[in-house]
Amino acid sequence: MRAVPYDPVRTLYRTLLIFDFVAILILAAGLAEFLYFEPPGQQTGIRATIAGVYQYDPTTNKTFGPERSTFTRTQLFAAVVDWKSLPPNIIVDARWYDTLESIVGSVGPGTPAQLESQPIVPVALPTNLKHNLPGQYIFVVERWANGVPVEVLARRIVQVERS
Amino acid sequence: MSAIARARAANPRPRGRPARYGVALAVTAIVVIVLVASSVLDYVFLDTIPGRTALYGLLAVGLVTLGTFIGVRAFDRDPAVRRRHLIRAGVLLGLAVLLWLLVIDLYVFTSSAGPSVAAICAAACLPTTAFGLVVVRRLDRNEKEPWRLVLVAFAWGAIVATSMVIWGESLWSAIAERLLVPGPGLDVSTAFSAGLLEELAKGVAVLLLFLVMRNEFDDVVDGIVYGAAVGLGFNFLESVAYMTNLYAIFSPDGVGGYAAGFQWYSRQVLGLFFGHATYTALIGAGIGIARQLHGRRQQAAAVASGFLIAIAAHFSWDAWVQFFPIESSALGLVEIHLRTLIMTGPFTALVIALLLSGLRYEGEALRDQMQLEATEGTGAILAPEVPILTNPWRRLGQRMQALTQRGFKAYFALARLQTAQLDLAMERWHRERQEIDTPLEAEYELRKRVIELRRQAGFQPAG
């Protein structure tokens, strides 16, 4: 009986197949993480009301001027949420994300009744910086379940201009 | 009966081109259709700056495609025809690069930091990227790939692959930001988008080289070289984009230079070989292994494996890099290196392991084929030449000897002879393994060419 000659290419091929298994594990872990933070079947149809995004005065903790969707880097701004528009038996929060997707302002989580005293959600300046970063800022009102935000109830996008 | 007469074509196709050219044409057509359709859709529905870049950049992409096509035709054995095609391809590729840089400057970088900052960032990335390309090309110690193909791979990574992913990632991001909760879930979604779209866009280049340039795509080593070159091209343009963007964001606070400099270090020094170069080298390794497998199913599995591992490697970095935060103290300098080593190191180690195994196997096979050629007494490879040809340092030593004794002309004549001899050994190896679709006449021509080069060089081996 003649022995099958050894072919190193088959060893390389088998090495690839072993790492295939590792790759599948990595992608499966990623999918599991995604499903944990974005669990299916969480759409309740509830909608929160964002009254608007306005310029903000930190000394008085009040907003002023007309509703806007663009600001300069030196202007402070805040979103105003109507917490009464939400059902009382849910847990919610509100957050600002800057252009680098860092959280730069939030209230909650808590029930809408607990958050009624905080309708204004200002954007905080990034650490060690004098002004807001330029780019897109996203404001979201989120519903929580099992300790993580699972549904966006309202969303507003504003632009901070470079100059 | 002579040894030459005993040899046979593994898959003789005396007329017409092999079927793989049809596959390559189909892949190219799909790439062009995707680019055109997506650019128009992106422009109409998203109306973003990247969308406009993709639309106006289509001309540059078209020129790259045409230049590549003509460049491939330059592989005619007639020197006059080759030179004409190479000049045409070079002009077209040069125009495409210039046009693309112009578009990028005008529509992306100028709007944020201005063209001068973009030019400075590009200039900062050029030496490191060039160093990376030289190192990657030298990895193939037995038979270096031609610069023109390495540069075509680099250009694809920098220009075509980046323009292919701009639309896809913009669209994915726009949809995800409207549907998903910001935070880890959205981050994972973005990581899937980057891993999938960027690796597919880069991998197409290696796949096309595999389909069209089979003579210059021998095994796993070549796949790694071409893949890494594509990755370096992608990394070059991505580095310039990130550096310029972060400069624009942080320059009003006086720290734009630091932000851009940090990006340069992490992408052009630390991540030069650990990032995109590793990911696309994994795709190249899969395709290179498929090159030497026989069954269609195994070939498809090897190609798919390369893509899958590359996608997973890229995904794991993008999705989980946040779990390794870097402190702003001196310890951060150690952490940033450790993070790269821990997260990308295992994949780079896999590439190195495949490369070393491939080099060893290739070296042994070439030595065997050279010895056989010498034994057959055709005059193309002589017995004393075998130990020199199988050792890159001894090859260089022999060329240097020719340089010092007979000048540059002798050096280059000997270099051409050595390359042709290695090509002949490689051709014999592929024919023995039944993995070549060129007719046997090609091997005869190669042998005649070696003998002619030896005559022109007037070279007699030592010993």
Image (tube, coloured by chain):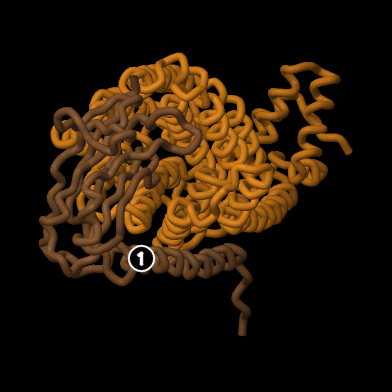
Chain colours: A brown, B orange
- Provide residue B194's location: percent of width, then percent of height: 38, 48
Residue B14 makes an appearance in the image: no
Q: Is residue B455 left or right of residue A13?
A: right
- Which quadrant of the structure image shows residue A57? top left
Q: Pick the residue in front: B86 or A120.
A: A120
> Numbered disc 1: what chain?
A
Q: Pick the residue in front: B421 or A26.
A: A26
Quarter of the picture containing the N terminus of chain B is: bottom right
Q: Residues within 10 Å of mark 1 (few under 14, many from 20)?
A: some
Q: Looking at the image, is B105 positioned above or below residue B443?
A: above
Q: Pick the residue in front: B101 or B362.
A: B101
Q: Amino acid at mark 1?
A: Leu
- Which quadrant of the structure image shows residue B332? top right
Quarter of the picture containing the C terminus of chain B is: top right
Question: Residue tagged by mark 1?
Answer: A31
- Provide residue B385's location: percent of width, then percent of height: 78, 41
Residue at 50% across, 57% down: B323
Q: Is residue B146 left or right of residue B312?
A: right
